[in-house]
Amino acid sequence: MKQVPLQHFLNTQDWSRDQLDAVLAQAAEFKRQPFGAPGKPRALEGKSIALVFFNSSLRTRTSFEIGAFQMGGHAVVLQPGKDAWPIEFDLGTVMDGETEEHIAEVARVLSRYVDLIGVRAFPKFVDWSADREDRVLKGFAKYSSVPVINMETITHPCQELAHILALQEHFGTTDLRGKKYVLTWTYHPKPLNTAVANSALTIATRMGMDVTLLCPTPEYVLDARYMAWAAQNVQESGGSLQVSHDIESAYAGADIVYAKSWGALPYFGNWAPEKPIRDTNKHFIVDEAKMALTNDGVFSHCLPLRRNVKATDGVMDSPRCIAIDEAENRLHVQKAVMATLAGQRR
Ligand code: CP
């Protein structure tokens, strides 16, 4: 008999719009009833999830652990190289270096213990052509016999859902078509991951919004894969996509301003020449004057955020800032994703 492939949550682009809408609706229900409907079995009763963190986290770790608990499940946190063995991902490697076990064993063994595996693995920031292959996440998905959830690698799909739920709540509708959405690059002293920017572009276009990617120079345009996803999405959703380097026209009339800092891809692995470009663009900070150009727009950010570097105190403390709502929604959307995926086993 032919095996049914496992459904993972690696990217929202892999899921149909109906599936995403169903998860968002279930997340809203979890927000109303955190422990599920009275008298009904909880979605993760007797089940467990391994949360594999190769990088730091506050929100992701806390919200997944609490989410599993609220649904009657159990979460185990593992940090390879810290409290778990360092993992090898290349096939054919003579493992006489630092790595102690291979992903082929790690994912298979974890699959015998748990019902879901979450993975956080940022790029190594040396070679984008290697990082863009998302080998760690794909390695888990290849060898796991339970569903794998992306907890942020080169995209951040859980953040996407939390962001959209916060916007739906703010605007009082699940239909975000026609909203003017600005994804703005902001300064940060270090070149950061493009994951949240890739994700924001992907989901905003998927939802049919009129999206402007605002960044200082063409070098900050995102990877071709995500620009192509966004272009495909606007074809299907009826939204639009433009790239702008002009702050005033981008902010003018915006309904939503979403900020993120990221490193310019052409400088990956050789960041020194990028620093002067980055340093001359500190004025991309989201401040009250820029927000005053919007259509009484809302501001959000995935967090963590360096105040008065990426956005001012005034913007962060404004009632138009929905970043805390978005952070809360991580809990609800991840519960919906876990509840949707749990129970599959190959
Ligand atoms: N936004 C987000 O993923 O936060 P953490 O890095 O704290 O998990």
Image (cartoon, grey):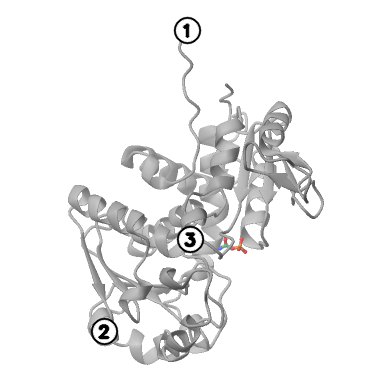
Query: Label 1 amino acid?
Result: Met
Above-or-below relation of 251 to 334: below
Query: Label 3 amino acid?
Result: Trp
Above-or-below relation of 45 to 211: above
Residue 204: image quadrant is bottom left
Q: Which residue is mark 3?
A: 128
| In-front residue for pair 126/56 | 126
> In the rendering, at what x and y percent does residue 125 appear?
56, 65
| In-front residue for pair 70/289 | 289
Q: Which residue is mark 2?
A: 246
Q: Viewed as shown, does residue 253 lie left or right of 42?
A: left
Q: Viewed as shown, does residue 122 lie left or right of 276?
A: right
* Residue displayed at 54% across by 50% down: 332
- Whole-angstrom CA distance, mark 1 to mark 2, is 57 Å
Label drawn at residue 1:
1
The crowding category of the residue bearing disc 1, from other C-alpha atoms within 10 Å (few below 14, some 14 to 19, many at least 20), is: few
Above-or-below relation of 179 to 151: below
Say which label, 1 or 2, has the lower sequence index.
1
The crowding category of the residue bearing disc 3, from other C-alpha atoms within 10 Å (few below 14, some 14 to 19, many at least 20), is: some
* Residue displayed at 24% across by 50% down: 232
Q: State whether residue 119 appears in this view.
A: yes
Tell me whether the residue at label 1 lies in contact with that at label 2, contact meaning CB atoms closer than 8 angstroms.
no
> In the rendering, at what x and y percent does residue 3 appear?
48, 16
Say which label, 1 or 3, has the lower sequence index.
1
